[in-house]
Image: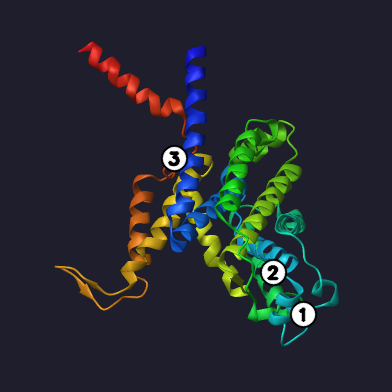
Amino acid sequence: MDNNKDLKRILTFSAIALGIGLLILFNYIFDSYQLRILNMCGIYITLGLSLNLIYGFTGLFSLGHAGFMAIGAYTTALLSMSPDLKELNFFLVPIVPWLANTEWSFFPALLAGGLLAAVAGFLIGAPVIKLRDDYLAIATLGFAEIIRIVLTNTQSITNGSLGLKGLPPYTNVWWTWGLALASILFMIYLFKGSYGRAFKAIREDQVAAEAMGINLFKHKVLSFTIGSFMAGIAGGLLAHLIGTIDPLMFRFLITFNILLIVVLGGMGSISGTIISAIVVTVAMEYMRILDGPMDLYFFKTDGISGLRMVIFSLALLIVILFFQRGLMGNRELSWDMILNPLKNRKKGVKGE
């Protein structure tokens, strides 16, 4: 038993060391486009885990993630921009005086974006958390749209529909993957404790969970608030990766992409979300060639806009038909899952 534990410990540390080594290697050999995809993978891991906490583990069908991302993105951007850059952006309507000369370093600004998104999540979640399924989804989707409209119409604070441009490129591999790793570790330790078990109990049966003494309101609001905080952090990273943001970026489509990652990976699976986030992000980027001109032996086009989404949707449909609970279901990838098939094969050889 101890030997088995030692082996798993060695394998875990080896996997972590390998991951860090690959990030260092990729950071040096990848071009700017490939690095952007790598950073997007890290951001979508954090986003996928944040929505999985709310929907997959607690059973709250929320469609408001784009709104919380927007709050985090705008807060981080406005606090980290220099006064000169703000003056260049706010050329139609001057920025409010209390923001004009404010300039924070990146980490405090990112943390403030997450905290403000968490406050918004609490204020939004508390009144609607008693709703279930489709009703909760519609309510959170409505709040996300309200946030987007507010951002569009508060021109002296957010620059309205013009958005913010020329943001400092603070986001890099270490920020995106460092926070992705922090999110993974947080989720692992959260669901080893009593709060994680309470979240799962609420997902399975709210009546039974309440009968066992679990405070439904407290745990639902806590789950919603934590998920909103993580979404705000990811929104801040995304803003400083792309370098420009506007309210149209945070429409329902971005929430749909995150929901796609959660469902495809498996609702209630941390490792499934990680795998799905990487696969979906990389596939969506490299399948852009399908939208351009193609000259194959059996197929020739001058360019069909949206073809990659058709192919991707068909592939997704096939996966959902054969894996209705996602790639991992609610299971987690473990060393036992990897090592046991090898052991079983050895036993089979010996038996023969």
Asked whether the viewer can see residue 343, the reply is yes
| Mark 2 to mark 3 CA distance (whole Å) | 34 Å
The tag earlier along the polypeptide, 2 or 1, is 2
Asked which quadrant contains residue 292, the reply is bottom left
Q: Which residue is mark 1?
A: 156
Asked whether the viewer can see residue 332, the reply is no
Q: Is residue 69 left or right of residue 255?
A: right
Mark 2, other Cα within 10 Å: few <14 / some 14–19 / many ≥20: some
The residue at the point 45 percent across, 47 percent down is 25
Which labelled disc corresponds to residue 328?
A: 3
Q: Which residue is mark 2?
A: 147
The residue at the point 51 percent across, 18 percent down is 6
On screen, 176 above or below 305? above
Q: Is residue 101 left or right of residue 55?
A: right
| Mark 1 to mark 3 CA distance (whole Å) | 46 Å
Q: How is the image coloured?
A: rainbow
Residue type (three-letter) at the residue carrying disc 2: Ile
